[in-house]
Image (cartoon, helix red, strand yellow):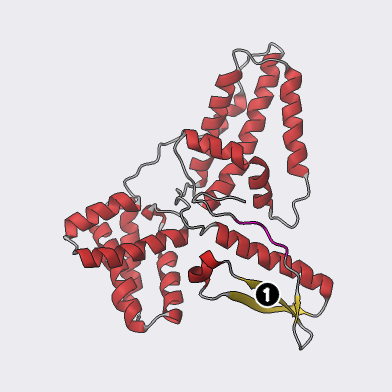
Amino acid sequence: MVHKGGTTMGFRMIEPWKHPRKVLWFRRRVPKQFFALMGRREIKFSLGTTDEEEARLRCVEENLKLERLWQSHVPGRPLGRELDYRQTVALAGEFYKEFVERHQKNPGKAAAWEASMARDRALRRLPHFPLTLAQHRRMLFGEQVEAFLKSWDLTLAPKTFDTFMQEFLEAKAQAESVLVRNAKGDFTPDRNSDRFPEWTPVSDEQRLPDLWKEFVADRLVSRSTQKKYKAIFDALAERIGTDDMSVVAKHHLSDWIAELKKKLARKTVKEGYAAALKSFFGWAKRNSSPRLRRHGRSADSMRQKRL
């Protein structure tokens, strides 16, 4: 599997490792590019069973969790946008409209569209184990979805991408059913097209690059502080899978601080990470849009807790 940024990853099947105490364990070396992310070179833990068949199943499940985590943290992978569900369905509606408009004047033969629909249904019914259903869809239909998103100059955050893929496939099936009717001489409007809400173009105003420039200029941030703070906010964006700061919620900040306190010195967390979050989101609360101001309140409540 080749990811953006030139990193190649392959799905590995991991067999349970027999611990001297007979309990079966999960054991896997961490790829070099993820040493910093994982903080170790090898991952091993008990699978909590001595039954070999059960251990194999648990091994696959744990391995998939790791693969998913690593896939979402491939170096160089563009950070994507988070969309709410309504916007996700609306974007699928834009694909639907484009697809129908592209073929409606000369829809060709109904049998061709029926065959396409049948092929997609058959692919979606294929057993997906040991992949998750979302991974299975990405493997089968990812290129189609990526091509559409590229035409719109959009990159979606991993969770949004998976939700959109499901809606994309539903929209495609709906569009092809319309073209089947068109090919048979029936051009009555598709009543179900009204199910797609209106698409609202996404803005860059709340994305980290634009906000960062405003913050630095407004607060006259020194170069040394810029370097330190920017690394922290790049890490936050990488952690949540998007550089859209309007989606940052209280739990994103508090959970991260809690994890950092387990790994780093108290002073480092308080004077580094917490100070950066307090400064940036406090500024956002005072100066940015209402949607981002609520995350300034998240920083307020976080810093009120004892660090």
Callout 1 secondary element: strand
Tally of marks: 1
User: In the rendered image, which residue does mark 1 sit on?
Assistant: 27
**Image location (x, y in percent) of residue 138:** 63, 46
From this view, report whether residue 48 is shown above or below residue 102. Answer: below
Relative depth, front residue between 32 and 172? 32
* Residue furthest top as drawn: 185
What's the magenta region? 9-13
> Does the magenta portion include 180?
no
Q: In the image, 130: left or right of 265?
A: right
Classify the position of the C terminus by image quarter: bottom left
From this view, report whether residue 245 is shown above or below residue 193. Answer: below
Q: In the image, 214: left or right of 230?
A: left
Residue at the spot 28% in from the left edge and 62% down from the top edge: 280
From this view, report whether residue 19 is shown above or below residue 236. Answer: below
**Image location (x, y in percent) of residue 224:** 22, 67
| Residue 28: quarter of image | bottom right
> Does the magenta portion include 12?
yes
Q: Local crowd at mark 1 within 10 Å, few (<14), some, or many (≥20)?
A: some
**Image location (x, y in percent) of residue 278:** 29, 68
Q: Amino acid at mark 1?
A: Arg
Q: Can residue 99 be seen from the camera position used here?
A: yes
Residue at the spot 46% in from the left edge and 34% down from the top edge: 152
Magenta: main secondary structure equals loop
Residue at the spot 72% in from the left edge and 67% down from the top edge: 14
Q: In the image, 73: left or right of 141?
A: left
Residue at the spot 76% in from the left edge and 88% down from the top edge: 20
